[in-house]
Amino acid sequence: EDGIRDFCLSRGLGDVYKRQAKTLHDKLAPLGAKALLESLPAIINQSYQPEPQDESQACYAHKLKKSEALIDWNESAVQIERNIRAFNPWPVAQTTLNGETVRIWQASVMADDPATAKPGTVLAVSPDGVLVATGAGVLSLQTVQRAGKKPMPAPDFAHGLGWGRHPQGACFE
């Protein structure tokens, strides 16, 4: 479920009021703006009553590193697709193809049955995406980005590499 929540940072920073958009920034930003307008007067006149967090339910989220966004094609299609969503917009999931970095902006799970090819192998190109074998299932790459280029539909990427509908030997590393 998506939503917004007021929270107060207090450890090490003093009392700082922040607005957090849990996910889907563009969808939730208008809701956050409205909620801020409603709570701002109470913050200014110091009548705002923050509710302390239950420390037993708290967990620490470390700062993301680019290395965490490297795709491990041995993982399941479901896990890789989740990672792609988690690392968008930063640091963006990435892999390599023939030594060149390729960023993966969007993908979907086509099947979560075991693939018959080596993980990372390009199985086919369709109008909807580039199908890639994973450790468990098939992932359809939908939006990709070559180094120094803008993000593009994966079928256009495949066309630019001269791949037909069934590329031979293409494998992401």
Image (tube, rainbow, N blue to C red):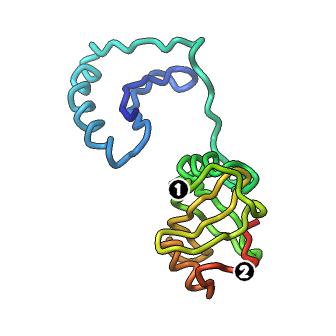
Tell me if residue 107 comes above or below residue 163 in the rendering: above
In-image side of 96 versus 36 (left or right): right
Q: Picture coordinates of residue 67 (x, y %)? A: 72, 53
Q: Residues within 10 Å of mark 2 (few under 14, many from 20)?
A: few
Residue 124: which numbered mark, if any?
Answer: none
What amino acid is found at the position of numbered circle 2 in the picture?
A: Gln
Question: Going 25% across and 27% down the picture, which residue do you hit?
Answer: 40
Indicate the quadrant containing the C terminus: top left, top right, bottom left or bottom right. Answer: bottom right
Residue at image location 46% in from the left, 12% down from the top = 52
Picture residue at 38% right of the left edge, 15% below the top? 50
Element marked by disc 1: strand
Judging depth in this view, the residue of 123 and 24 nearest the camera is 123
Q: How far from the left and from the top, in percent, is residue 170?
A: 72, 76
Give the side of residue 90 with respect to residue 95, left or right: left
Q: Which residue is mark 1?
A: 108
> Label 1: few (<14), some or many (≥20) within 10 Å?
some
Mark 2 in CB contact with mark 1 (< 8 angstroms):
no
Against 164, residue 12 (above or below) is: above
Instruction: Measuring from the top left, give residue 107's x and y in whole percent.
Output: 53, 59
Q: Quadrant of the N terminus?
A: top left
